[in-house]
Image (cartoon, rainbow, N blue to C red):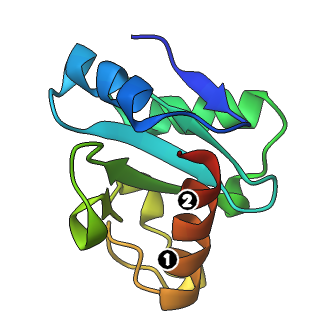
Amino acid sequence: MAIIIIKEKISKDRLNQFAKEIFGDMIKIVVDLERKIMAVGGEMHADCEQVLLDNGSKQENLWGANIYPDSEGDNFIEYQSLINIRPKVGNRSMEIQNEKIRKQVREVINLLIE
């Protein structure tokens, strides 16, 4: 599956199509908090991260997550990715531990998904 950069609204149905291509019910994403865009698709978050870096994003603004398009509420976003392990900024886990960053990731996702 190709990785695409989402800069404008995308429907949950379209995301569901992407999800079914690889994982069935989930799609990997990387959000650029500064540019308020995200890359979706691929088998690894690092692939999405690289697409954004090649497109002008800065690594410190990128955070990985998983989206479950058929889910709602707390089950819609999972804030886990290997690219989130950043001891230098205090994130020593695959999960985004800083609630402020989680909120920013959620805001970008909500901005871009209908």
Name the amino acid type tagged 2: Asn
In this rendering, position of residue 3 left or right of residue 27: right
Estimate how packed mark 2 is, as few (under 14), some (14 to 19) or many (20 or more) residues with alpha carbons within 10 Å: few
Front residue of this view, candidates 21 and 114: 114
Q: Residue at x 38, y 79 (%)?
A: 92
In this rendering, is residue 100 above or below 63? below
Mark drawn on residue 110? 2
Q: Residue at x 84, y 37 (%)?
A: 56
Q: Residue at x 60, y 68 (%)?
A: 107
In this rendering, position of residue 52 left or right of residue 110: right
| Image quadrant where residue 84 sits | bottom left
Task: Locate residue 96, reporting x and y percent.
Answer: 41, 74
In this rendering, position of residue 98 left or right of residue 15: right
In this rendering, position of residue 57 left or right of residue 1: right
Task: Locate residue 39, reporting x and y percent.
Answer: 57, 35
Q: Which of label 1 and label 2 is nearer to you?
A: 2
SS for dot 2: helix
Front residue of this view, candidates 90 and 21: 21
Task: Locate residue 12, reporting x and y percent.
Answer: 40, 37
SS for dot 1: helix
View extreme (top): residue: 1
Q: CA distance from mark 1 to mark 2?
A: 12 Å
Estimate how packed mark 1 is, as few (under 14), some (14 to 19) or many (20 or more) residues with alpha carbons within 10 Å: some
Q: Residue at x 37, y 39 (%)?
A: 28
Task: Locate residue 103, reporting x and y percent.
Answer: 54, 79
Front residue of this view, candidates 25 and 52: 25
| Image quadrant where residue 95 sits | bottom left
In this rendering, is residue 60 above or below 46? below
Q: Which residue is mark 1?
A: 102
Name the amino acid type tagged 1: Arg
Tag 2 or tag 1, which sits nearer the N-term?
1
